[in-house]
Image (spheres, rainbow, N blue to C red):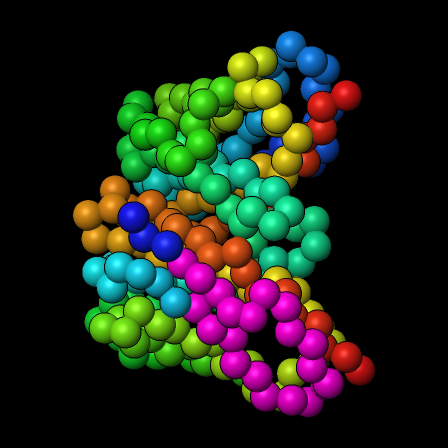
Amino acid sequence: DGGITQSPKYLFRKEGQNVTLSCEQNLNHDAMYWYRQDPGQGLRLIYYSQIVNDFQKGDIAEGYSVSREKKESFPLTVTSAQKNPTAFYLCASSITLGQAFFGQGTRLTVV
Amino acid sequence: KQEVTQIPAALSVPEGENLVLNCSFTDSAIYNLQWFRQDPGKGLTSLLLIQSSQREQTSGRLNASLDKSSGRSTLYIAASQPGDSATYLCAVITQGGSEKLVFGKGTKLTVNP
């Protein structure tokens, strides 16, 4: 069953903690993306990667980190430096300049 | 910097009506434009992809058009159904824009039975 899998679906973070969101795809796509969605703000790009072992900052990268050690995996770490991490996080993948496919999202809440 | 605007922000129609959602973008040098659907609390579902050389794409009751020179796209939904209720987003990849998708804020559609 091909697609993009994000886990967990819900995540709770205490103040000062780092948390990692998982994104895995079996579509053999080169490009992967992380977006943050807040009410009334639309989707904002955090990081993206066009190829293994390479990634670029998006519009709101501060307080986040990523790695791309394998083609199928693009985990996102929300660090303690991110002051307002409560949001809905979406991962996507595509062939270069092709149709993008999204996972079902992870809802992160600070407690 | 590419900016994508979607008007209206919300739309409510009776079942069976044909409707048009609008998307405009400021930089016409795009590779492609995509339309997505998002249900509450869910991820995005890709509906249609239009390459920059194309004028339109169709899938079932959906038809998307692209006028690159004027920076506009429309999504036409025929014979709307309550199941079409969702937020519809458009996104573009800009040439020379590091190949990333830039999204509009979406149009929230409600189809009333």
Would residue B49 be seen by someone viewing this image from the given angle? no
How many numbered marks have been drawn onto this rendered protein structure?
A: 0
Compare residues A28 and A75 and report the one nearer the observer. A75
B44 in relation to B20, above or below: above
Question: Most prominent secondary structure in the magenta stretch?
Answer: strand
Q: Residue farthest to the right?
A: B113
State the image coordinates of residue B103 (x, y, percent, origin top left): 44, 53
Say whether residue A45 is magenta. Answer: no
Q: Residue A66: which quarter of the image?
A: top left
Q: Residue B54: which quarter of the image?
A: bottom left
Tell me if B79 is positioned left or right of A91 in this view.
Answer: right
Point out the stretch of residues depicted in magenta.
B4-23
Say whether residue B12 is magenta. Answer: yes
State the image coordinates of residue B18 (x, y, percent, origin top left): 59, 88
A84 in relation to A99, above or below: above
Residue at 34% in and 33% down: A49
Q: Residue farthest to the top?
A: A16
Image quadrant for the C terminus of chain A?
Answer: top right
Residue at 51% in and 46% down: A43
Would residue B72 be seen by someone viewing this image from the given angle? yes
B78 in relation to B98, above or below: below
State the image coordinates of residue B46 (x, y, percent, origin top left): 49, 60
Residue at 47% in and 73% down: B22
Residue at 49% in and 26% down: A75
State the image coordinates of residue B3 (x, y, percent, origin top left): 37, 54
Compare residues A70 and B59 and report the one nearer the observer. B59
